[in-house]
């Protein structure tokens, strides 16, 4: 029999993350949005959960637990139900560490992975997105020019998470006709890190821009060394992670709007009894379920090592469109209350809008 349900272990992980989101994430989400910063003690509390270190092999100092893309998607959803901004911040180091673990050379793994197995929170970030109205992550404008036994990187990146404190950046760039990634240390000559960016949503998550002005890197800074790496698969994993965050935002909106509609009385009856509201909530539920099935399916392909380019593109495109639709309808359900800070729906709408445009074009 085919089962679309999680395993017993996945249920336990989801429950643990749900409790953490309720107790540690949701209560501080609004304050982080208003202050445009995330407390260091929150990042440390997430680090103590071992979301990154436990999935790194023991030979590099980690816990050695088996990594599951499907389970990680579930974790992202649960954290994003609490708040997508804090979820993105909490898991940003994992994006870098997983790329090194899956695609790095042995020397790169030995040098970098132990950084994520310490007791203190450590930040490192993917630098994929580039400024401009039209952007395709698979065709970056940043270029890497071979020079003797080195590479010279030139270009710009934006929306780099935790860039104010990251020790390393994994920068994607064109190397001739190939797509490569390079480990760029924070103190690299020619690298300029901007002041924190001002964004519509995800305001608590500090993002920066990078300017790479002929940044010269040793040959072994290329991810995977001489063999290179499958950067496309790193991008696809990132798309699945973004989709899981957008799913979590959508679920948060629905779980907030249903009880609100039952309690909110207009013309002597709860607005949930109005067909326009009831049908809207029903459609929001349907879209949320569709997003989840797409995220789980794409994550399953990733976990099994199958081709995921099309699945990842479609999932991100669908979740970007529908999470914005769900959050917009959440505002409509609350009416005038949807626009005021007393309720979190306007914040979730801004977060969904920002998550949906992080990678530019959505067409396959």
Image (cartoon, helix red, strand yellow):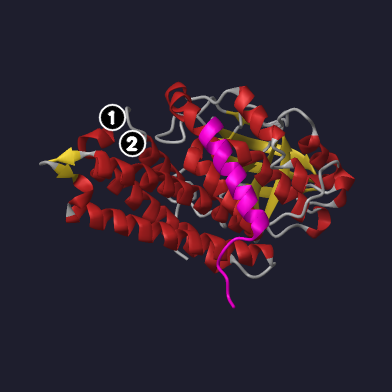
The residue sitting at 73% across, 54% down in the picture is 67
The residue sitting at 56% across, 39% down in the picture is 19
Q: Please tell me whether mark 1 sits on a helix, a strand or a loop.
A: loop
What is the spatial separation of the Cα atoms under label 2 and label 1, in whole angstroms?
7 Å
Residue 96 position by quadrant: top right
- Please, is residue 356 above or below residue 118 in the view? below
- Residue underneath mark 2: 346
Q: Nearer the viewer, residue 155 or 12?
A: 12
Q: Is residue 176 left or right of 38 when viewed as pictured?
A: right
Start-end of magenta stretch: 1-24
The residue sitting at 67% across, 55% down in the picture is 9
Q: Please tell me whether mark 2 sits on a helix, a strand or a loop.
A: helix
- Residue underneath mark 1: 340
Q: Is residue 326 left or right of 335 when viewed as pictured?
A: right
Residue 3 position by quadrant: bottom right
Q: Residues within 10 Å of mark 1 (few under 14, many from 20)?
A: few
Q: Main secondary structure of the magenta part?
A: helix
């Amino acid at each position: 029999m085919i089962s679309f349900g999680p395993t017993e272990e996945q249920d336990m992980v989801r429950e643990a993350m749900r409790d953490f989101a309720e107790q540690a994430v949701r209560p501080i989400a609004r304050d982080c949005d208003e202050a445009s910063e995330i407390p260091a003690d929150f990042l440390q509390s997430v680090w103590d959960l071992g979301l990154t270190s436990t999935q790194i092999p023991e030979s590099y100092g980690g816990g050695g637990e088996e990594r599951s893309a499907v389970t990680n998607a579930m974790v992202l959803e649960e954290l994003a139900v609490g708040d997508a901004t804090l979820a993105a911040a909490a898991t940003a180091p994992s994006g870098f560490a997983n790329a090194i673990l899956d695609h790095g050379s042995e020397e790169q793994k030995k040098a970098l992975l132990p950084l994520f197995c310490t007791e203190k929170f450590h930040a490192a970030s993917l630098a994929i997105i580039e400024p401009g109205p039209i952007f395709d992550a698979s065709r970056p404008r940043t270029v890497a020019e071979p020079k003797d036994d080195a590479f010279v990187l030139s270009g710009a990146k934006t929306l780099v998470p935790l860039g104010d404190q990251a020790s390393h950046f994994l920068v994607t760039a064109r190397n001739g006709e190939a797509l490569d990634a390079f480990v760029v240390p924070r103190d690299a000559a020619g690298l300029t890190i901007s002041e924190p960016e001002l964004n519509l949503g995800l305001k608590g998550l500090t993002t920066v821009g990078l300017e790479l002005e002929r940044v010269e890197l040793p040959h072994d800074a290329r991810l995977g060394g001489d063999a290179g790496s499958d950067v496309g698969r790193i991008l696809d994993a990132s798309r699945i992670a973004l989709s899981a965050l957008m799913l979590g935002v959508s679920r948060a909106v629905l779980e907030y709007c249903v009880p609100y509609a039952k309690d909110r009385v207009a013309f002597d009856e709860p607005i949930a009894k109005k067909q326009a509201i009831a049908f809207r909530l029903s459609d929001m539920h349907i879209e949320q379920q569709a997003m989840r099935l797409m995220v789980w399916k794409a994550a399953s392909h990733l976990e099994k090592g199958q081709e995921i380019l099309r699945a990842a593109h479609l999932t991100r495109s669908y979740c970007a469109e529908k999470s914005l639709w769900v959050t917009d309808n959440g505002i409509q359900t609350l009416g005038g209350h949807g626009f005021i800070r007393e309720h979190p729906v306007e914040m979730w709408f801004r977060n969904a809008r920002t998550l949906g445009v992080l990678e530019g074009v959505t067409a396959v």
